[in-house]
């Protein structure tokens, strides 16, 4: 089976279910955005959340995707940086639990954390992210031998503010012969790194994952038109449109993929796990439409739980449904 290496922010997710949107205003966070915060602001938000009760789970976009690919049976690896603290150790143990071959460098600052604020009625997520040690990952940290022997290289968009490190990473991945995929991560990350993202996609990236707001921010177009525009710059474009499913395009081949049935609880991790299912299916050489369908299946399972860790019964159900899809295409 094919192998996949990823790079991203090594973060711990702190998930809080808010009763309404009012606290977002108190925290100065636009609904649906991803805001980077300094240590002081991060601590202030954390102090607001603690009395409400929260879930603490090892996360990070690329790491979530790699947990999925590892469960599917792909050899999976991760590059990131953590602090010398309990959150860094929690992240390391989570990677080991899933059999991920991780290179976790040690930083000076505390380990990063992503505070995920989930609001009704559609379980929309707003992020306040303190990157901490994750932000210390530098181009000089990356070694060519870390990239050799992998078939895929996956990048999370949340890391692209670190331009020099991402540029170095994609250069090494391309030299190693990897197929490169990018998850755009957040519309405001796209807006603030637009020129750089266009450069990276056009020069290095083979597969782009974006949701409708990210695709619009990247192209200035509606989701369907954005899909076509992105597909002109890479081999495969994927635009996810929430409850309406997703759209995929490669060359002249276009497919609209229906959302798999699910009881929505929390949308955190849906895009990360969609990417895991899609890349797993792609590594098996399955048709483009089936890749999208398998991504949709596993995304539907993760939205039924709080956080990004799917329980065993749902994983078993997903694998059964995915096996049936694969059998239909053999």
Image (cartoon, helix red, strand yellow):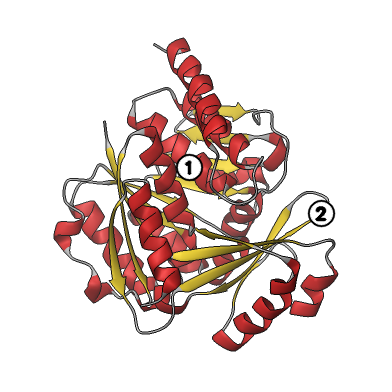
Q: Tell me which residue sits at (59%, 80%) in the image.
A: 37
Residue 83 location, quadrant: bottom left
Classify 10 Å Cα crowding around label 2: few (below 14), some (14-19), many (20 and above). Answer: some
- Looking at the image, residue 278 sits to the left or right of residue 15; the answer is left
Q: Which residue is mark 1?
A: 275
Residue 220 position in % (x across, y down): 64, 56
Q: Foreground: 138 or 184? A: 138
Quadrant, the C terminus: top left
Which label sits in the foreground, 1 or 2? 2
Q: Tell me which residue sits at (49%, 56%) in the image.
A: 61
Residue 297 position in % (x across, y down): 57, 30
Residue 14 location, quadrant: bottom right
Q: Foreground: 96 or 152? A: 96
Q: Tell me which residue sits at (33%, 34%) in the image.
A: 73
Q: Tell me which residue sits at (56%, 46%) in the image.
A: 271
Residue 230 position in % (x across, y down): 50, 47
Residue 4 position in % (x across, y down): 30, 44
Looking at the image, can residue 233 be seen?
A: no
- Mark 2 lies on a secondary structure that is loop
Extreme residue in the left direction:
145
- Looking at the image, residue 274 sits to the left or right of residue 19; the answer is left
Q: How many marks?
A: 2
Q: Which residue is mark 2?
A: 120
Q: Are marks 1 and 2 in contact (CB under 8 Å)?
A: no
């Amino acid at each position: 089976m094919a192998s996949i290496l990823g790079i991203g922010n090594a973060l711990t997710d702190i998930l809080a279910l808010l009763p309404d949107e009012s606290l977002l205003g108190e925290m100065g966070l636009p609904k649906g955005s991803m805001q980077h915060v300094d240590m002081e602001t991060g601590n202030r938000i954390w102090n607001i959340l603690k009395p409400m009760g929260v879930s603490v789970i090892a996360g990070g976009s690329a790491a979530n995707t790699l947990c999925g690919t590892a469960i599917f049976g792909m050899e999976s690896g991760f590059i990131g940086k953590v602090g010398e603290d309990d959150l860094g150790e929690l992240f390391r143990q989570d990677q080991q639990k899933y059999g991920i071959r991780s290179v976790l460098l040690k930083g000076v600052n505390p380990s990063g954390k992503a505070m995920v604020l989930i609001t009704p009625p559609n379980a929309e997520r707003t992020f306040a992210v303190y990157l901490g040690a994750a932000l210390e990952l530098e181009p000089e940290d990356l070694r060519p031998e870390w990239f050799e022997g992998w078939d895929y290289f996956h990048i999370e968009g949340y890391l692209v503010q670190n331009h020099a490190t991402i540029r170095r990473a994609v250069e090494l991945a391309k030299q190693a012969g990897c197929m490169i995929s990018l998850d755009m991560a957040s519309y405001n990350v796209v807006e603030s790194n637009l020129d750089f993202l266009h450069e990276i996609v056009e020069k290095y990236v083979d597969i782009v994952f974006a949701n409708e707001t990210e695709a619009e921010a990247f192209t200035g177009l509606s989701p369907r038109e954005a899909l076509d525009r992105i597909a002109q710059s890479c081999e495969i474009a994927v635009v996810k449109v929430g409850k309406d499913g997703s759209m995929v395009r490669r060359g002249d081949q276009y497919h609209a993929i229906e959302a798999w049935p699910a009881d929505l609880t929390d949308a955190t991790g849906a895009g990360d796990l969609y990417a895991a299912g899609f890349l797993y299916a792609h590594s098996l050489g399955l048709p483009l439409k089936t890749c999208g369908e398998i991504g949709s299946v596993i995304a539907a399972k993760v939205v039924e739980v709080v956080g990004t860790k799917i329980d065993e019964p749902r994983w078993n159900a997903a694998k059964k449904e995915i096996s049936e899809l694969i059998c239909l295409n053999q």
